[in-house]
Amino acid sequence: MVDTLDDFVAALNAMLADLALPPVGRGFVEHTVGKGSEHLIRCTLAETGGADDRQGEAWASYQRHYTRINGDHARLYPGVQEGLQRLREAGIPLACLTNKPTAFAQALLEKKQLSGFFRHVFGGDAFAQKKPHPLPLLETCKALGVAPSRVLMLGDSANDAQAARAAGCPVILVSYGYNHGQPVREVDADGFIDRLDHLVIG
């Protein structure tokens, strides 16, 4: 829904400056995001020569900087607002499930005026596992009160598709996902759309 890559780059490089480590490029971040903040920071430390025992220090710095800039460099993908509006008008209950920490996700949705579309917002810290494990999606289905087979997962990466397959949910991916640098259309999914408002309802 929201392209947050430049938020990640800004927060990570501010964190690295705090740790007196070299900055990372946009390409590195593009290929690394999607598996949760802990994974992102661990990979960033490895990329820049940071020691493993600096994970805690790095996490605290990253949290501080991301909270400060969350949404400042982000933009909605075309068709998102219109697509969510159509889904709401069709009476379809919506939940947002992301590997981003819940507080970051909620603040971002509010800043981009999307929070009102969702009945529930669950981040990567909401459950004991993160996507691609099926647990977060199964718990989201429970919260919606709908069987997994009747919940459509709209995602942008292999993480989403793998979680959906394991949970028993149909899955459609948007074509513009980062997907760790791999082509999204090569992922095992039930379909692909270029814009959220291209989703056929009914």
Image: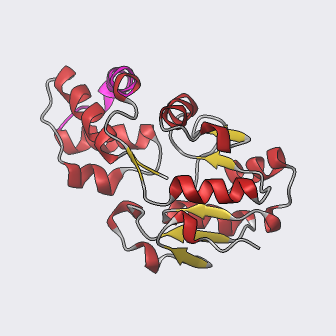
With respect to residue 161, does 63 lie above or below?
Answer: above
Residue 128: tell me if it is visible: no
Residue 131, horizontal then vertical, whole percent: 58, 53
Q: Nearer the viewer, residue 127 or 104?
A: 104
Q: Nearer the viewer, residue 8 or 112?
A: 112
Q: Is residue 17 left or right of residue 132?
A: left
Residue 137, horizontal then vertical, whole percent: 70, 53
The stretch in magenta equals 49-66
At horizontal 71% and vertical 71% (from top left) the residue drawn is 201
Find out whether residue 64 is within the magenta segment. yes
Q: Is residue 11 left or right of residue 193?
A: left
Please tell me whether the stretch drawn in magenta is mainly helix, strand or loop.
helix
With respect to residue 94, does 41 lie above or below?
Answer: above
Find out whether residue 57 is within the magenta segment. yes
Residue 42, horizontal then vertical, whole percent: 35, 39
Quadrant in which residue 69 is drawn: top left
Report the number of discs.
0
